[in-house]
Image (spheres, grey):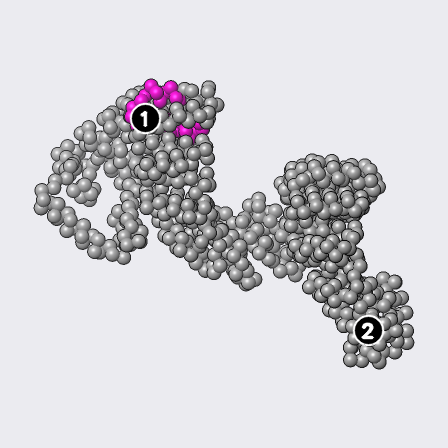
Amino acid sequence: MQNPNGTILQLYHAGRLAAALRAFESLPSSSPASAAAAPAPLTAATYAALVSACSRLRSLPQGRRVHRHLVASSSSSPDAQLAGNTVLGNHLITMYGRCAAPDSARQVFDEMPARNPVSWASVIAAHVQNGRAGDALGLFSSMLRSGTAADQFALGSAVRACTELGDVGTGRQVHAHALKSERGSDLIVQNALVTMYSKNGLVDDGFMLFERIKDKDLISWGSIIAGFAQQGFEMEALQVFREMIVEGSHHPNEFHFGSAFRACGAVGSWEYGEQIHGLSIKYRLDRDLYAGCSLSDMYARCKNLDSARVAFYRIEAPDLVSWNSIVNAYSVEGLLSEALVLFSEMRDSGLRPDGITVRGLLCACVGRDALYHGRLIHSCLVKLGLDGDVSVCNSLLSMYARCSDLPSAMDVFHEIKDQDVVTWNSILTACAQHNHPEEVLKLFSLLNKSEPSLDRISLNNVLSASAELGYFEMVKQVHAYAFKAGLVDDRMLSNTLIDTYAKCGSLDDAMRLFEIMGNNRDVFSWSSLIVGYAQFGYAKEALDSFSRMRSLGIRPNHVTFIGVLTACSRVGFVNEGCYYYSIMEPEYGIVPTREHCSCIVDLLARAGKLTEAANFIDQMPFEPDIIMWKTLLAASKMHNDMEMGKRAAEGILNIDPSHSAAYVLLCNIYAASGNWNEFARLKKAMRTSGVKKSPGKSWVKLKGELKVFIVEDRSHPESEEIYAMLELIGMEMIKAGYVPKHSWKHAIVDHIDSDLFNEEMLAEYG
C-alpha cells in the first residue's frame, strides 16, 4: 500500500470504519518493531481517523494497537512528536472513555505535555460514562483550580456526575458557575440540568428550566418526560409527551415512547397506552427493542397479558431484559404454566437465563400444587450455576415456604453460604407462618451469634414466636439486642415489644417501655398497653389508660376498643362495656367487627346473661363464628345451662363438624349435670366419627436448649426415661394419698346404659 494515509482516510470518510482498521492492520509497520520501515508514515489526521473509528466501534483492543503504533512511530514521523499532539491525545481520551477504560483515559491525560479545555472535558466525560462520577467531579474541580475555563461539555459532564451521585447541592453550584460563565443558556448544559433536577426529585425545578429552553431538542423533551415518569408524575409526563407531538418540530424516538409507555403502565391507563401504541406504529418504533419492551410491560401492568404477549412477539430481536419482563409479567399474575412456556422459548432462542429470570419464576410457585414445578426450577438453576447467588437462594427458600415444604426451605437455608438479613428474615417468617415458634427461637440464637446487623423484621418474627410461647427471657434478649443495635427508637418495634411483654405477663416491663417512648407513642402503643392490661384482668388500669389516651386527643382504633371491651368483660363491667360498644361508630366511625361482637358475647356470657348473649348473636349483621359459640358454650358449662350449651355446641358443629372442643365441653356439661346417658352418647358419636381431642403441647428450656413435649408423643430422644420418671411420680402421688378429683369410671358404670359404652371405651376413663 503506497499511500496508506489516503486509503485509510478515504475508507473512514466513507463510513467504512472496520475496513479502515483492516487497512491499518495490513500495514507492514503495524508492529512497533518495524514501524520505522513503513512505506509511508501515518499522519496525525490518519491516526485521528483510526482512533475515532475504534471509538465509534467501541473496539478497545484495536484502539490499544493504534495507540501503541502511534507511540512507536512518533520519533520518525514527519509530524514531529505525534505522541504529544494535544488533538490526538484528546481523541485517545475519548476513545478510552467510550471503550470503558477510564484508567487508560486518565493515564493519557496525565501524560499530555499540553492540555486544552477539550482535554479536560474529554477526561471528565470518560469518568462519568464509566460510573466514576466522584472522580469526574474531582477532575472538574482540578480544572477550575488550574484556571482553565469550563466549556459546555465539561459543565454538562459535571452536572451528569452530580445526577449519578444524587448530589443536588454540588449540582446547584455547577449550575451557578455555568450562569456566571455565561454557559447557562447552552443547550447541553440546560439538558443536563433538567435531567439532574428531575431525576433527584426536584421535578418543578427541572420543568421550570425546561420551559426556559428556547430551542428544545429531542434530549430536552426526553429528559423532562422521563423525569416526570420516574418521579410519579405520570399524567404530567403524558401531557408533555402530547405537547411534543402537537408542537411537531421533533419526532419522538424510542426513548420518548418508552417513558410514555411506563407512565401509562404506572397509572394503569390502558386507553392512553393504546393510543400511544398506535402512534408508535406510525413512527415504526413498535418493533424497536426498547420501545417494544416498554410497550409489552405497559400492557402487562394494565393486566392485559394477551396484548403484552402480542407486543413482545413483535420485537425484532428481544434480548434477555425483554424476555425477563414478559416472563415476570405472567409470574406476577400467578400464571406459572404460561411463564414456564415462555421460559422454554427463551432458552430455545439461545439466551441464557439469569437470576432475574429464575426469581420471577419462583415467585409464581405458590401452594402445594406448584411444588413440583418449583423443584424443577430448583434443578434448572443449579445446572445454570445460579445456586451461589444469594438473592436466587432467598427466592428459592421463600418458594418452598409458600409451597408448605418447610423441611426443604430449611435445607436451602443451611446450604446458603453467604447468608444475609433477607435469608434470615425469610426462614424466620417461614417458621412463624408454619406455626413452629420453637424453631424461630432456635434460629434466633444462631442468628444472634453470627449476624451483626439484624433488622426489625427479624426481631418482630422472634417477638411473635416469644409471645406465642410466653418466652419472657427471649423477649428480654431481643429488647437488649434492639438497644445495642440502635433499633430501640423504632416505633413499630417498640410497639411490638410492649405487646409481647404484655402477652408474656410482664406488664411492668410493658409499662416501663411505654413511658420511655414518650412523644413517640402512637395509637398502636396505647392499644398494646390497654390490651395487655385487659388480658390479665387489670380493668381499672386499662380503662384509665383509655381515658388518658382520649384526653391527649389520640383517636382509638378498632384494636383499642377490643382491649376496652375485654377489660370490661374480665371484671364484669357489663354496663360500661355496652356503653363503649355503643359509642364506637357514632363517635369514632369504627364499625363493629366480629372481634368486637365476640367481646360483647363474652361480656354478657361471663355475667351469666346467657339469654341476652344469645339474642345479641341472633341480632348481629353477620353470621356468628366459632369463637362466639365457644364463648357461649364455655359460659354454659360455667353456669350449668345444659340447653344453652347444646345450642352453642350445635352452632360450633354446624361450622366445623370435627371440632373436638365442642364435643369435650358439651361432654363436661353433661357430666357436671349428671346426665350420663347423654355424656356416653356424645362420646360414642365422637368415637364413631373419628373426632379426637387435639393433643396438648408444652415446652421448657433446659441448659440453653428448647425442649418440646406433646401428649403421648414418643419422638423425644429421652422419652423412655421421661415416662419412667412419670410412673415413679404417679406411684409416689398414690402413696401420698392423692385421689383424682372425678372418678369417671364409677360414675359411668353406675348411671349409664351399658349398650352405650363398651369395655374399650370405658378403659379410656378408668
Residue matched to label 2: 74
Taking the image as shown, residue 392 lies to the left or right of residue 439, namely right
Q: CA distance from mark 1 to mark 2?
A: 96 Å
Image location of residue 699, percent across then percent down: 29, 47
Residues shaded magenta: 556-581
Q: Is residue 454 magenta?
A: no
Give the position of the N terminus as an image quadrant: bottom right
Q: Residue at x 68, y 55 (%)?
A: 138
- Pick whichever of labels 1 and 2 is earlier in the sequence: 2
Image location of residue 457, percent across then percent down: 46, 45
Residue matched to label 1: 540
Q: Residue at x 56, y 62 (%)?
A: 384
Residue 377 appears in the rendering: yes
Quadrant location of residue 73? bottom right
Image location of residue 254, percent across then percent down: 75, 48
Neighbour tally class for label 1: few under 14, some 14-19, many 20 plus, Cα within 10 Å: some
| Nearer the observer, 681 or 422 | 422
